Image: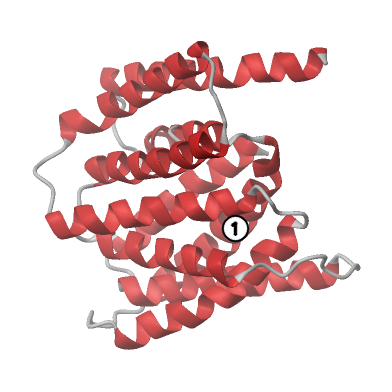
Amino acid sequence: MTSAALVGFASNSLLTRAALATHELDPATFTLVRVLAGAVTLVLLVALRGRPPSERGSWPSAAALAAYAIFFTLAYGRIAASVGALVLFGAVQTTMTGVGLVRGERPTPIDWLGVVLAIVGLLVFTVPGATAPDPIGLTFMALAGACWGVYSLAGQRARDPLAATAGNFVRALAPVVLFAAVSMSSRHVTTPGVLLAVASGSLASGIAYTIWYAALPALAAWRAAIVQTGTPLLTALAAVAFLGESFSPRLLVAAALVIGGVLLTVLPALHRRLVS
């Protein structure tokens, strides 16, 4: 489930890039369509499964989800993709690992080695292509990462991932509608842009976030943070495969470091669980 969720996160990055980088849709409209599509899809799935929901999400989780979507969209037009990935997942790491340590989680030395390797891999991937970042964009992306970390931490308590995610998306519509209403960006709407936003919200966000909530109860907070460092690399590899972007030796080295670091943190825990 974790792997499937990460594929969804990477797909979401590609869909967002395709819509905003080509100006098929303005950021405010993209965010609104994305969250609305996710809410509609998840509410229908809850209705079709034939049993009442055991939980309905929460306003704090919805606020974190909406803030993540809004800040990520605002940052996207002001900060380069490479440094943006570093800031986003650096903030996710700091938030989730910090909370995990406060809760009493204690990674082993081999786990810390995996964390270091994954972070080095992310640095190898992002820093050489980074330019001096826009400070406002940098702040927005850091806030987006912190909000996503908070939203992920809330998912560790989910008993009904589908219903919880549906409730969070429905509640998140209120702040997103307000954001779209007060946004000063000019409106630009095209059919391809709307379709990209719908795919982002329905599949890459709504369903992928449900899968993520289903996986989170089995993950320590710091481990849930470290596995997400693979998302920028998955996005880059998918861009090579589907968008014709070039493959570089730096990407290969970064992928090896991140994958190695994630495996160091995941495989020992998996082994202990299977043995027990």
Residue drawn at x 41%, y 66% is 67
Q: Provide the residue designation for mark 1.
A: 203
Out of 119 and 95, give the one closest to the viewer. 95
Position of residue 175 relative to residue 203, above or below, is below
List x then y, in percent, for residue 9: 50, 47
Compared across the picture, whether 89 is left or right of 45 comes to left
Residue drawn at x 20%, y 48% is 80
Compared across the picture, whether 235 is left or right of 152 comes to left
Q: Quadrant of residue 204?
A: bottom right
Q: Quadrant of residue 57?
A: bottom right
Residue drawn at x 43%, y 33% is 229
Farthest residue, direction right: 50
Position of residue 81 relative to residue 147, above or below, is above
Position of residue 34 relative to residue 8, above or below, is below
In the rendered image, the quadrant that contains the C terminus is top right
List x then y, in percent, for residue 7: 55, 41
Q: Secondary structure at mark 1?
A: helix
Instruction: Give the amino acid at mark 1.
Output: Leu
Q: Quadrant of residue 239?
A: top left
List x then y, in percent, for residue 211: 67, 48
Compared across the picture, whether 81 is left or right of 201 comes to left
